[in-house]
Amino acid sequence: MNIKDKSGTTVVRREAAGEPVLTWRDRLVGKPLPTTEVSHQTIGKAIGLAVFASDALSSTAYATQEMLVILAVAGTAAFRFSIPISFGIVTLLAILTLSYEQTIYAYPSGGGAYIVSRDNLGEMPALIAAAALLMDYILTVSVSVSSGVAQITSAFPKIFPFRIEIAVFLVMLIMLLNLRGVKESGVAFSIPSYFFVVLMFTTVIVGFTRYFTGSLGVVVAPPELEMLHAAQPITFFLILRAFSNGTSAVTGVEAISNGVMAFNEPRSRNAGITLIWMASILGVLLLGITFLAFQIQAVPSEAETLISQLARTVYGGRGWLYLAEIVATTVILVLAANTAFAGFPRLSAIVAEDGYLPRQMTLRGNRLVYSYGITSLALIASFLIVIFQASVTNLIPLYAIGVFLSFTLSQAGMAHRWWKSGRLKPGEELKERGSVIKQDSRWRVKMFINGLGAITTAVVMLVFGITKFVDGAWIVILLTPVLVALFYIIHVHYKNVADRLTLENFAAAPRIRRHRVILALGGVHRGSLAALRYARTLSDDITAVHVAVDPEEAERIQKKWEQWGEGIRLVMLESPYRQFVEPLLLYIGEIEAQRQPDEVITIVVPQFIPGKKINNILHARTADTLRKSLLNTQDIVITEVPYQVG
């Protein structure tokens, strides 16, 4: 009988008593937080800059070097082109900043490329954007950490052979910090992030001061110039390749628009200001470092990074300021991976919520973070570090093409959004899944800005794809459709499951008229009698079944059952080939073939539970074997009846 309360519902709500028992994992990542704490786990502009901008800011440590690596094939004379290339990259940065600031205000709940593309361009472009961004986040971790380790090995060459192990260790450390929560990890990362910004500006200011006073000089004992390819003339194609390498400086610009929900209220305003801060710092440092690197005649090399050469030239040796610069650069490069750890789990959770990734990605861990996403990112990035030997030069060709693809789709989607806004009448609204579109009097200007951003990033993407195709970009180009296909496979599975489980147009199932119980009997003892007592609560139609492989043992079981079996029939299945599970499955199959539409069969299996888990290997796991064999059989239930034996 259903018991209803005064409100007329049979549903009773009550709060679970007590707090969760702390495990060793909780002690490692922190005490579990209640769901009500989600709103208190937001961050302000200062911490937001450290969390979401560390990737973009850290790229100043390797963007110039990667430009020079390409120009080096035409000799050091080609290095002069690094300065105009840097201005081109800063111009691109300005366009992206204006474009993404509009995205932040249009999508206050998070306007990543996936959501913008989904609402404005359709399902396929959205999945392409998701695949591109997820790959970019993975590569961000691999490139940033590998570059940070390169800074360490520049200062301490003896540890160069251990760079892979160090890189993987650092990825795991960042993973652990992120599992502790966004707010806590943000506070931990903010100090070294600002330490890097202050020191880098100090290096640039001191460098310019020495340049204008004529005391800057050039690099002492520079590393040997490494030629990745045979000597080539200075061509437009070469400059385009250098430009594409340098555009790694603008990766990470989209991270703030993806994580608007992580900011304090007013979210859009705080996120927008943080974006402008980040772009300003990034642009100034990129231009300053590139100019000074050309003046001191720095040489791109994996043996010693460009930042190391710049710092020891500006500070006149490897003194404490040089070491502080190396430490700061190393830390920010490692922490740059935190941008990906902030973005990847959020994006994967949104995609999973739409049914294109495993549902587990939507689950929050004890610290209210998406633990599955964080762990997955760390493992995949570590795998890439091992495969590519923690080499930034080897990883860079895979980097950036994915993010520029997402840039293009996001900006094209925003341009289409403003076009839709222009079609609305004043006061009219168009509700979409990710936002609400209203009539905007400045829709033409905004559409122009986002359209310009889409065209610019599309050109850069094509340049990158063409110039870096042979060097490794083909891998990303190949993986993108593979990932999209995987998204569709997952989505089809979830859709099929939903179709099978839906209650729409579902007639009530017929009542169970007969419940037949089969008791799998290995022997007659306290455990099997406990299972028999349970079986009697289910039905009076019980059949005990024993597979007889030893005639003498079968005789003893028969005598015991006649004494203790309470009159329940026992079927002895003779097994001349000493098989146990197979005869039992055949017998169950015969019963199942005779089953009526309104009949259910339950297989009851006594299960020994040893006091120590290690002793499980000493017992046959019959229930597990039967469950795996019969899971796909409709209207058959397998029930374990545990019996603790100490």
Image: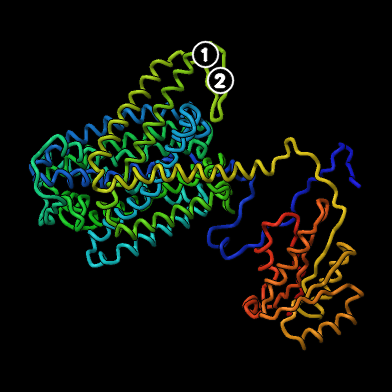
**Could you say which disc has been placed on residue 264 in the image?**
none
Residue 436 in picture, x, y percent from top left: 55, 24
**Residue at 83% across / 51% down in the picture?**
598
Residue 497 in picture, x, y percent from top left: 63, 45
Q: Residues within 10 Å of mark 2 (few under 14, many from 20)?
A: few
As drawn, the residue found furthest toward the bottom would be: 552
* Circle 1 residue: 424
Marks 1,2: beta carbons within 8 A? yes
* Circle 2 residue: 430
Residue 424 in view in this figure: yes
In front here: 177 or 239?
239
Quadrant assignment, res 102: top left
Residue 205 in view in this figure: no
Helix, strand or loop under label 2:
strand
Left or right: where 1 falls relative to 91:
right
Left or right: where 103 falls relative to 542:
left
